[in-house]
Image (spheres, rainbow, N blue to C red):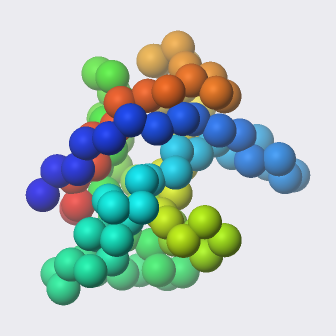
């Protein structure tokens, strides 16, 4: 099943310069409620993510503070799509 949404790219203000997209609550709830969603370490879910013309295999991670999943967006994707902190991006997620 594919999920499509728009969300803002943001940078985690910790020791590492990780960038994330927060999944909308409706998408996160649907993924959490799916009986066929295989959970891995830390409750992560494997996905194929697409932003622009770049697709990559990754995992989304639950964020207990926000109550949603987070999609990490690696440097190679940000560079390929010329996106940065604060940009709103179109995301497609396919559960792996």
In this rendering, position of residue 25 left or right of residue 84:
left
Location of residue 9 with respect to 48 vertically, above or below: above
- Does residue 68 appear in this view? yes
Q: Which quarter of the figure is the N terminus placed in?
A: bottom left
- Does residue 76 appear in this view? no
Image coords of residue 76 (percent x, y) = 52, 28
Most extreme residue toward the bottom is 35
Most extreme residue toward the left is 1
Image coords of residue 4 (percent x, y) = 25, 42
Residue in view at x 42 percent, y 53 percent: 24
Residue in view at x 66 percent, y 71 percent: 65
Residue in view at x 26 percent, y 69 percent: 30
Image coords of residue 79 (percent x, y) = 55, 19
Front residue of this view, candidates 44 and 32 = 32
Front residue of this view, candidates 81 and 22 = 22
Residue in view at x 23 percent, y 60 percent: 95
Location of residue 24 with respect to 68 vertically, above or below: above
Front residue of this view, candidates 86 and 60 = 86
In this rendering, position of residue 6 left or right of residue 34:
right
Q: Which quarter of the figure is the C terminus placed in?
A: bottom left
Most extreme residue toward the top is 82
Location of residue 38 with respect to 18 vertically, above or below: below
Location of residue 75 with respect to 22 vertically, above or below: above
Image coords of residue 52 (percent x, y) = 33, 22
Most extreme residue toward the right is 15
């Amino acid at each position: 099943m594919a999920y499509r949404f728009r969300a803002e790219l943001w940078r985690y203000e910790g020791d590492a310069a990780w960038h994330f997209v927060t999944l909308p609550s409706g998408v996160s709830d649907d993924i959490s409620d799916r009986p066929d969603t295989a959970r891995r370490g830390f409750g992560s879910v494997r996905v194929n993510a697409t932003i622009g013309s770049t697709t990559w295999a990754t995992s989304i991670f639950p964020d207990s503070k926000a109550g949603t999943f987070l999609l990490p967006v690696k440097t190679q994707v940000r560079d390929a799509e010329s996106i940065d902190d604060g940009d709103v991006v179109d995301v497609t997620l396919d559960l792996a």
